[in-house]
Amino acid sequence: MSGVGKGVAAASIGKILQSKGFSVTAIKIDPYVNVDAGTMNPTEHGEVFVLDDGMECDQDLGNYERFLNCNLSGANYMTTGSIYQAVITRERNLGYEGRCVEVVPHICLEVLNKIDKAAAKNKANIVIVEIGGTVGEYQNILFLEAIRILKIKKPKDVLLALVSYLPLQSPDGELKTKPTQYAVRSLNAAGLQPDIVIARAIVSLDKKRKDKIAFNCSIAEEDVISAPDVQSIYEIPVNFEKDNLSNVVLKKLKLKPKKKDLRDWQRLAGVIRNAKKPVKIGIVGKYFGTGNFVLADSYISIIEALKHSIYFFKQNPELHWLNADEFTDSGNLKKLSDYQGIVIPGGFGSRGVEGKIAAIRYLRERKIPFLGLCYGMQLAIVEFSRSVLGYKDANTTEINPETRHPVIDILLEQKRLLVEKNYGGTMRLGAYPAVLKKGTLARTAYKERLISERHRHRYEVNPLYIEKLEEKGIIFSGFSPDHRLMEIMELAKENHPFFVGTQFHPEFKSRPLHPHPLFREFIKAAIAKK
């Protein structure tokens, strides 16, 4: 089933093999006809993750980067749409030299071509390939067929792992293996047999359940890996090794480990298990709701970046979702004082904007640590312009194109592209450099003058208002090398313990063992708040 943990399982297997001395990379296959994830609704699909090269992709690429401590590229992501697009483009360019182009085998062979390219680009010994969706879905048939062809071509080099869920019907009941048996049967119907079954469940599997799966699914008992719920996803590689997963994989691939070093990860898992003192952080957003449930996946990179920094200080994350709309009622603003720090993340559109602006003013005036990301920074500029500069109708032209004070706007050269409906041409996507001003909080955090961060936005701080904002106390501590684009804004430390906004998305570059500098300093300020 979806959401069972395929992404973190894939990332964890990669981490374990990396710890054995192998160069590992990971690929996500999304079954959607969308060419990339950029047009997908975050409340439907989860967060859109952005790579250095500007590729908008599935959030699992974020898991791969965080676990493998690497920067991936568009070569590590494919969708049904991108594969069909590549095949059709090649056919139009006579790349098939007049042959009839068919779904099978040409679509499947293009999938394998992408896998080969990712392996070569990343100089990888081992490629982890995650097929999104579920076994038996119509959309996945071609990808399963591609793997079947790959197993025929390279039988000694391909392993297939199935991540399957074992339900527990009641606290005093037993784990049920029948859904897993049917999942394997569905996989068999596609011509594939799993070499390993990763058995997800609330609790660890006992020997009886392992024997049952092994017998009914035609695998050895040692090939059934227990994957119980854990406090943190960063415990999963350590958990897998309790069932000797690396030995199972390397034995089947006939590889010998070059080294053994998962100690840093084991230390991190120990910190997470033993952290007791909570750090209470609120996230004011609008992409949480999906029916009666909360979809944390909409902001997964922010959540993980916060955790990385809180674990860095050996404390326990206590994260709360706050709906931006409720802060349009001033009576609700006092709730923000219950938190040690507030994050206002990125987003698009008008919903929740006035609530976020009201929240930002409250945080600024009451000196509560604040971190604004992308849209969060832009709205901090709008709030400051209204409250301090006195421009009561100040706004971003994304919300009010007719505002007399467009403090956030699209640059002139981009407006022409927008009129032509060339929306991609108006987006800043991927990694861009920024220069940091000496003596600022940002420079202190990074300890470097020149940095590179990932972007996903269309609007910028309007150059016409920069001088006025600076005169009243805004410090633009980070800017593009040509000084045209404002990348980081902050208030002086003597005026506020931590009030920082970034035009980029620092959460995309945070790692479990290497927290992002700005998140780390934000959490440091939050811990200091009584």
Image: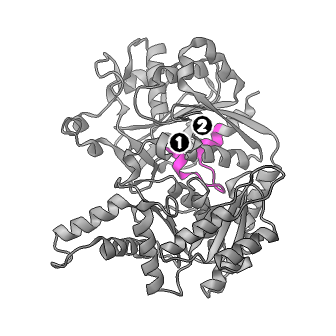
Q: Does residue 296 appear to the left or right of 76 in the view shown?
A: right
| Residue at image coords 71%, 49% | 312
Residue 388 visible to an observer of this rendering: no
Which residue position holds label 2?
A: 294
Asked where in the image residue 2 lies, by quadrant, the reply is bottom right
Q: Is residue 151 above or below residue 355?
A: below
Asked where in the image residue 523 lies, by quadrant, the reply is top right
Residue 294 visible to an observer of this rendering: yes
Q: Is residue 518 magenta?
A: yes
Badge 1 amino acid: Ser
Instruction: State which region is magenta.
Output: 505-522
Q: Does residue 430 appear to the left or right of 20 in the view shown?
A: left
Q: What element does badge 1 sit on?
A: helix
Asked where in the image residue 77 lies, by quadrant, the reply is bottom left
| Residue at image coords 65%, 25% | 368
Q: Which mark is residue 298?
A: 1
Measured in 3D between alpha carbons, the distance from the residue under mark 1 to the one under mark 2, in whole angstroms, is 9 Å
Q: Position of residue 175 (x, y in %)?
A: 75, 59
Q: Position of residue 19 (x, y in %)?
A: 66, 72
**Along the viewing direction, whichever of 354 and 136 lies nearer the viewer:** 136
User: Quick one: quadrant of the C terminus?
Assistant: top right
User: Quick one: quadrant of the N terminus?
Assistant: bottom right
Q: Is residue 420 magenta?
A: no
Mark 1 nearby-residue class (10 Å; few <14, some 14–19, many ≥20): many
Q: Nearer the viewer, mark 1 or mark 2?
A: 2
| Residue at image coords 67%, 46% | 307
Mark 2 nearby-residue class (10 Å; few <14, some 14–19, many ≥20): few
| Residue at image coords 70%, 64% | 177
Q: What element does badge 2 sit on?
A: strand
Badge 2 amino acid: Val
